[in-house]
Amino acid sequence: MKYPISPDLVAEKNDQLTPDLQKDFDALGEQLERRGLNIQALTEQAEAFDIAVPSWGTGTGGTRFARFPGVGEPRNIFEKVEDCAVINQMSGCTSEISPHFPWDAVDDFTELKAHSDQYGLGWSSVNSNTFQDQPDQERSYKYGSLSHADAAVREQAVAHNLQVIEWGKQLGSKVLTVWVGDGSNHPGQQHFQRAFERYLASAKAIYQGLPNDWEMHIEHKMFEPAFYSTVIQDWGSNILAAMETGERCKSLVDLGHHAPNVNIEMIVSRLIQFKKLGGFHFNDSKYGDDDLDSGSLHPYQQFLIFNELVDAEHRKQEGFAPAYMLDQSHNVTDPIESLINSATEVQRSFIKALLVDRNALENYQNDNDAIMASNTLKAAFNTDVSPILAMARKNKNAAIDSLATYRASGYRQQAAKARPDTGGSRSGIV
Ligand code: AFD
Ligand code: MN
Ligand code: MN
């Protein structure tokens, strides 16, 4: 196994931090025991938790106004894999990469798979891209792709998705995620029903080419790049499309793709109930598709989402196995640091949700005791589970203090030397 950062450095830093961690861990363990919770079991759950990193998140993002690149940015998918290996080595909970095509397309996928294998990394959902024109492309997506009025454009977009599945097969992926920018900027520009009908026909054509052990995930987004209407605007359109398309077609929830203040946890519950929750793109948002770091603004909302997920697991809800992925754009931070932090924050929400006393909550709900029901959730949310997360990292030979260890390694400075800017980075675009 190959490590981008010296395991000796990680061990040395961990050794320094272990005595204090052990004290904090034991104190928390005692407290949790009084609440009927076992810290060892929780630590094992933290160790088993995994969330995929988006390949494009390893580059500095930007807005439509400007992009201010950092140093040592990955220039191709091989270098993105190396950065993902750093994130996993430090966080201990990101063992898979989600690639975006054609951005990450290579001539030899066997070579790419061998490259990721040596770092112990796998591949999660493959993402198609019909929201941009590529240089070698015959027809334009300016007015849409899977829902375009011209059948030839729709066929081209379907063919691209089928190609992405083929690439994904070579990497060992099992999920195709489809997000389209299709929509309209002016009232009257597009016939809502006809556009949706065309989308559904295209989605079915892709689904026909989906291997039996794969899922297709549809991602909704309220606006952008279309600013008046989008074809898959909300979870309603999404679940309808997933239901029409087929059993293994499910909805993907990107936290930034809803109107402000929408109750996302309830959307999650509805999707779970109808076996249509495919997965997540985690990020945080204040205004729209901000793609801010997970848990940086609304950690309670993220916890409430995990409360629904853990509840579904607790009830052994049939067919429940959502795929977790980050989808963020890092404009002012080192993307590696943001991704390490974000993965940990999502893991934190998961562990906190495991602390909820579900029997007590159910009783309070049945008794209409609103305040105690709310306090039951708050008791879990207000517990600092940092020692559990740190111990899980230590047990997996990841870094107890991920950011400090990453900074001490000098990885970014070395990358800056090894990867002079070619002006060709295609990562972190949106
Ligand atoms: C978009 C969507 C979608 C897409 C990504 C591309 O969230 O997941 O694949 O950004 O950068 O806003
Ligand atoms: Mn997304
Ligand atoms: Mn997005």
Image: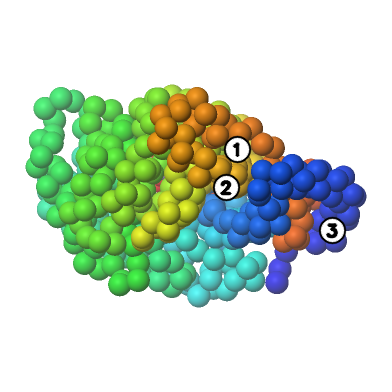
What's under tag 1, amino acid-wise? Ala
Considering the numbered disc 2 on the image, is that residue within a helix, a strand or a loop? helix
Q: Quadrant of residue 193?
A: top left
Classify mark 2: residues with Cα within 10 Å, few (<14), some (14-19) or many (20+). Answer: many
Q: Position of residue 135 (x, y in %)?
A: 34, 51
Left or right, residue 368 beside residue 400? left
Nearer to us in this view, 365 or 249: 365
The residue that disc 1 covers is: 380
Whether the residues at callouts 2 and 1 have beta carbons within 8 Å, the answer is: yes
Q: Quadrant of the C terminus?
A: top left
Q: Residue at x 9, y 42 (%)?
A: 194
Label 1 neighbour load within 10 Å: few <14, some 14-19, many 20+:
many
Q: Residue at x 55, y 29 (%)?
A: 375
Vertical arrangement, residue 18 with respect to residue 187, above or below: below
Q: Choose between 61 and 96: the one closer to the eye.
A: 96
Residue hosting label 3: 11
Q: Residue furthest front?
A: 367
251 relative to 292 in the view: left or right: left
Question: In this view of the protein, which residue sits in the foreground, 187 or 379?
Answer: 379
Horizontal and vertical percent for residue 13?
86, 51
How many angstroms separate mark 2 from mark 1 (CA)? 8 Å
- The residue at which mark 2 appears reads as 354
Label 1: state its secondary structure.
helix
